[in-house]
Image: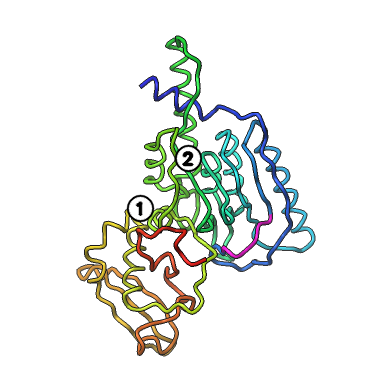
């Protein structure tokens, strides 16, 4: 137990070098955007390890740059691209609170690496949807590396007093409490918490000398991480794909693995409808309660029982949603 407490105390261990924040410039005019768009380029970039004072320094730079754009009549989504091995988690959590408060998104570009404290900062990515409220905005390229692990502490051999161990345990618990408060509580977001309980548990179960990387469709979908940009043009979704998308969505919304649902997802009843305004697809998941997934599709889709993936204008349907949960992210078309 004491060893566990001392390991958690490493959350406060600080690296020597500071992280760097680069202001790239406002790269979009996405004022009325409603969902995270992986094609939007970075407006800022953070590289290196987090050290003492980084969050305050970066907060000033972030807010000054965004306010400067607003004063010039430029509006769009601020998106920070990350490439960092981690560092001081206390600094990352302070900066994460700013991202949630100010609606600043996060992104991992192709082959970028974001681990440990950086991964928690990435999960805080947010944006203000036009006239809708606050939502999550964290997108990773299929080839990026997003890694979580339990904290660790490197200490010299020696004897530790009860007071030292107790203090270390208290500090560790305070940091975990802050992580829960800052990332696991909803705090007014329309699409739920930023850090799912299952991710928190998986992170704490990963030894400090190892890394839990987000590598599969199921992990990304369950933990609410956008993946892209992906090549979806010309891809047609069939009735089978709508069944898969609905089963994945229901599992991930409940913070459950969709892999375990493979035994029955193909049995869901599908109802194609044609209305005056267009067609729709309803996937019934519970005959007793009427629970279902509803997707609006272009007119004529009910006749062909299919639609182009980029023409499904409501419901959660994209290449991730219709993929096998076991599929690796780097095998998706990008």
Mark 1 nearby-residue class (10 Å; few <14, some 14–19, many ≥20):
some
Decide which of 313, 84 is in the foreground and name it.
84
Magenta segment includes 217 = no
Extreme-left residue of the structure: 288
Q: Position of residue 188 (x, y in %)?
A: 50, 52
In this rendering, the answer to whether 114 lies above or below 251 is above
Task: Give the residue displayed 45% in from the left and 73% down from the top.
Answer: 314
Most prominent secondary structure in the magenta stretch?
A: loop
Q: Badge 1 is on which residue?
A: 255
Q: Quadrant of residue 73?
A: bottom right
**Image: magenta residue range:** 38-43
Q: What residue is pinned by disc 2? A: 181
Does 42 lie within the magenta span?
yes
* Quadrant (top left, top right, bottom left, bottom right) of the N terminus: top left
Above or below, 39 against 112 in this view is below
Circle 2 packing at 10 Å, graded few (<14), some (14-19), many (20+), is few
| Numbered badge on residue 99 | none
Q: Earlier in the sequence, mark 1 or mark 2?
A: 2
Query: What's the residue at 26%, 57% (across, down)?
Result: 260
Determine whether the residue tagged by mark 2 lies in a helix, strand or loop. Answer: helix
């Amino acid at each position: 137990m004491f060893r566990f407490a001392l390991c958690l105390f490493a959350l406060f261990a600080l690296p020597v070098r500071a992280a760097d924040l680069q202001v790239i410039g406002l790269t979009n005019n996405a004022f009325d955007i409603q969902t995270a768009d992986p094609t939007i380029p970075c407006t800022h970039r953070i590289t290196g390890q987090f050290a003492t004072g980084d969050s305050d320094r970066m907060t000033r730079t972030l807010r000054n740059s965004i306010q400067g754009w607003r004063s010039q009549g430029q509006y769009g989504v601020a998106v920070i691209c990350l490439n960092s091995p981690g560092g001081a988690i206390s600094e990352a959590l302070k900066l994460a609170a700013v991202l949630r408060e100010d609606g600043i998104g996060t992104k991992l570009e192709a082959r970028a690496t974001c681990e440990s404290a950086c991964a928690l900062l990435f999960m805080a990515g947010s944006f203000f949807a036009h006239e809708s409220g606050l939502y999550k905005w964290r997108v990773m390229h299929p080839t990026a590396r997003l890694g979580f692990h339990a904290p660790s502490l490197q200490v010299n051999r020696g004897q530790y007093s009860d007071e030292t161990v107790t203090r270390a345990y208290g500090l560790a618990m305070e940091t975990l409490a802050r992580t829960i408060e800052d990332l696991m509580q909803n705090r007014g977001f329309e699409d739920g918490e930023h850090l799912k309980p299952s991710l928190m548990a998986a992170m704490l179960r990963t030894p400090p000398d190892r890394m839990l990387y987000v590598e599969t469709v199921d992990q990304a979908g369950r933990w609410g991480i956008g993946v892209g940009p992906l090549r979806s043009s010309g891809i047609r979704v069939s009735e089978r794909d709508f069944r898969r998308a609905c089963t994945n969505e229901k599992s991930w919304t409940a913070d459950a693995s969709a892999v375990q649902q493979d035994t029955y997802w193909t049995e869901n009843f599908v109802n194609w409808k044609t209305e005056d305004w267009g067609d729709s697809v309803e996937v019934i998941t519970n005959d007793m309660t009427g629970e279902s997934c509803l997707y609006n599709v272009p007119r004529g889709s009910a006749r062909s029982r299919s639609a182009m993936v980029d023409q499904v204008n409501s419901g959660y349907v994209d290449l991730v949603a219709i993929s096998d949960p076991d599929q690796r992210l780097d095998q998706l078309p990008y």
